[in-house]
Image (cartoon, coloured by chain):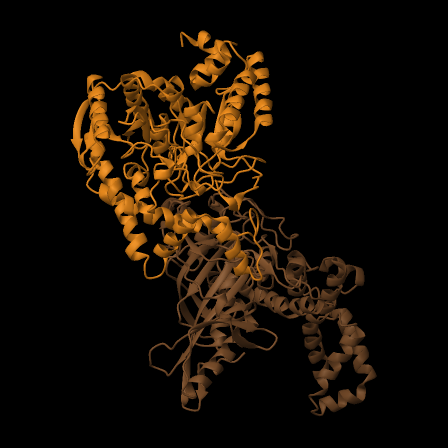
Amino acid sequence: MTNLASKAAVKNDLVRLTLAEAKEGLRQKEFSSVELTQAYLESIRQNASLNAYILETPELALEMAQESDNRLAKGDARPLEGLPLGIKDLFCTENIQTTAGSHILEGYKPPYESTVSGNLKKAGAVFLGKTNMDEFAMGSANITSYFGNVVNPWKRADGKDLTPGGSSGGSAAAVAGGLALAATASDTGGSIRQPAAFSGVVGLLPTYGRCSRWGMVAFASSLDQAGPLTRDVRDSALMLEIMAGHDPKDATSAPVEVPNFQKLIEQGVKGLRVGIPKEYRLDGMAEDIVTLWEKGAQWLKEAGAEIVEISLPHTKYSLPTYYVLAPAEASSNLARYDGVRYGLRVPGKSLDELYENTRSQGFGDEVQRRILIGTYVLSAGYYDAYYLKAQKIRKLIAQDFKIAFQKVDIILTPTTPSAAFALDEKPTDPVVMYLNDVLTVPVNLAGLPGISIPAGLSREGLPLGLQLIGPAFEEGLLFRAGCVLEQAANFKPFLER
Amino acid sequence: MTNRYFYEGATGPWELVIGLEVHAQVSSNAKLFSGAATTFGAEPNTQVSFVDAAMPGMLPVINQICVEQAIRTGLGINAEINLMSVFDRKNYFYADLPAGYQISQYLQPIVGKGYLDIELEDGNVRRIGITRLHLEQDAGKSIHDQHPEKSYIDLNRSGVALMEIVSEPELRSAEEAAAYVHKLRSILRYLGTCDGNMDQGSMRVDVNVSVRKPGTPLGTRAEIKNVNSIKFLAQAIDYEADRQIAILEDGGEIIQETRLFDSVKGTTRPMRNKEHAHDYRYFPDPDLPPLILDAEWVEKIRQNLPELPDAKKARLIKDYELSAYDASVIVSEIEIASYFEAVLKVLNPCNSKSVKLMANWLMGDLFAALNREGESIENCPISPEHLAGLMSQIQNAVISGKIAKEVFVLMWESGKDAATLIEEHGLKQMSDDGAILAVIHKILEENQGMVEEYKAGKDKLFGFFVGQVMKATAGKANPDLVNKLLKEQLVK
């Protein structure tokens, strides 16, 4: 932070700061929250073509910033006082439209605030708006949003528009492109880590139960977990400390203490055993990704960790298991969008017609596809063969990790099998699209924490991420190892280029 | 009510097989998974939380009171409590089901096998097995008759906790089914786990009925829904038995289907196919971890259970030598039992004779008065203390039984106690030999002819003399004393 003053001298540079740097800058009165917020609002205007936000709330943001400046002036600052964030449109925000990227919720203004966004609000954060996402978080390229696809700020040499990944594509693009200091996101099968990898930012999936799901539009309840997208590991720790915590309103929220993660991050990895799961070396995995993975292991080794080859034998079943369980839960979770009480209603002559009209016009193709899959796998006659079997395999996958963590402290893998692809190259076969999640879904199935650290560039000069997986509630280990990778990789984010 | 174990058909007798699913609303101030209130009869959509309306991102959190009530009920029906149970989603679309699924318990209910004993009119007792009890949410209410094209939805009931109590198919007659529901209702009310108000929908019964030739395997059943009184239950069963027998005897087949009871016509009719053609796609609710109960907590609940009707009845028979019939009547409703026991507490003397006397008054004059005035026993103008006071006056021969009836009426009207009223109205019994003798002498003097006839052997005239004495004393003379003294005088 030595060059903070010079950085801040140029107003545009305000959007390049990390959360921790901006916090320090506000504390030192180098700039005000209103100035910081205005810089972000200006950046959002200039980068409107990225389509990172579904809804911008500039008036509200400036109001919150003013309030923060008042508190800062009084020396009454809260942990995230005056820091402008993007909120994924999956988090219900009181009296502010929350759509989950779907037409069926267009115009819906919840009369309540989700626990996670509420925690951030109470910590003094400024909300810039609601970030774009795949419809109901179903997607890996942010192309299923009713409000249009998001464009990755990164460009390939051929100049083609790239996907920022999904489903938290809007949050990832916003953080990478200087449209938010940090953002909330959610991860059901990779929706934080994959866009983090594609956009060159840090994405953390906390342990299932670490953050409350109350007020988060549900996709697959047993897998959904909120987490932050940030510019570095320290910011991730700072965000998690505020977002996390036991919530009696969520029966799956874990009654555990939230450690002081920021204190842990610089403890290094000396003496830690790092597992390299052989099953993650996929057939035909791109050479640059394999190389980066090896580099990552080398960096950790150089920092004093021991590298151990491990086996997670049921890995190959993860994707099919996930694509049975997640749609099953989704088919039931999305039944409430029926046109009766809120959101879109397309009238019909009968109740059934009302349902048919509302849901066929309100839901996009991918959402309808998953509702159909989910309904099918839960149906009489298919339940045992699909849902029940998938539940059993899920236990085996969790067991794999449990056994592995008897041998190692942490696991290192690539985050994605490829770098960001161009929007016009998107797979037309949904199953090919689902392959994007192959390295991330096992972590959700096991309920474990995972983090994606930007660690290098692909042949085409696009960001690649390394994933660290830890035992339940050991996000501290992820931050420690993540910090080592971050320093070793010396990755230059989009805003520094 | 008929107690037909066998229905005579053209081809001989048919046996009836009945199983009941009772939905009992859990007595609780809040719903099963939300903090919303559960008051009956509130303005539509005023008792609805965001969870009950299934707003996006809302999550259910189990209400511990409802769990405790289910355990209490399970223990009250002699059932196993499952220390691990699971909540499942039962998926179907309907406008009054906001989430598109009902949270229920499917494969692993909170309460397993139990039983209850039912008593029949002929005094026989039958033990009826209970398969399970599980917790589930109620749905809202659709109102179809307020607008030509639209339906209105009231979500006040949405999310209210219900216990579904499923019997084994061991009931064999309408009378047994009625006795089962009556007994179950009584137990629930003793436990305070359901108010049992069938007319308010706090207790609803689905009836599974099939018929078979005795000794043969179970026949195909029909399920009858919408039965909301014990009277209708018996009607529905009798109608359904006759209907099924007629079909079978005509060579037809029973279709497994859901039927609705029409209380106006006393018949059942099939539900429209759409109303029940569901594949519910049950699966464990991922928002709710399995419900794990602490064995010690269950034990504590067991130890704090109130005395239930069967135990109370046995105790009343043993301690006070009450007849089985009297004891049954007294324990049948918790309010009667409570009143009875409140009287016992202050009854002096309290022995089998005085208790029997009190029971007769309770079941005789008091019930009659309550019935006549359409009053419930909780609002009885004669308090238990006052009834005990009246008994003392009778037992201590302060008044005769006949005068007591007068005093009872005065007590009912004034709310005053017996002693005060006897004093105010000068109703105290004459138990003074001299005073009664004076009256006797006067009567015998005035009726010398009759005295002669009596002495000549016309014994029946004794009653006449007693009557005259009682009349002259306005009923206040101690009848035993009158008898004794009169006999002495007439033999002279």
For this view, does A14 lie left or right of residue A374?
right
In this view of the protein, can residue B344 be seen by the observer? no
Q: Residue at x 53, y 76 (%)?
A: B268
Task: Pick whichever, B405 or A59, lies toward us.
Answer: A59
Query: Which hue is chain B drawn in?
Result: brown
Tell me: residue A19, above or below residue A281.
Answer: above
Percent across and percent down for residue B106 are 39, 57
Q: Residue at x 70, y 91 (%)?
A: B458
Percent across and percent down for residue A15 are 47, 18
Tell me: residue A194, above or below residue A477.
Answer: below
Percent across and percent down for residue A258 are 39, 26
User: Which quadrant holds residue B168?
Assistant: bottom left
Task: Pick whichever, A299 or A408, lies toward us.
Answer: A299
Tell me: residue B104, above or below residue B34.
Answer: below
Tell me: residue B390, above or below residue A268.
Answer: below
Q: Residue furthest left?
A: A309
Q: Residue furthest right?
A: B446
Percent across and percent down for residue B116 are 43, 65
Task: Pick whichever, B417 or A116, lies toward us.
Answer: A116
The chain assigned the colour orange in the figure is: A
User: Which quadrant holds residue A276?
Assistant: top left
Q: Residue at x 69, y 80 (%)?
A: B487
In this view of the protein, can residue B271 be seen by the observer? yes
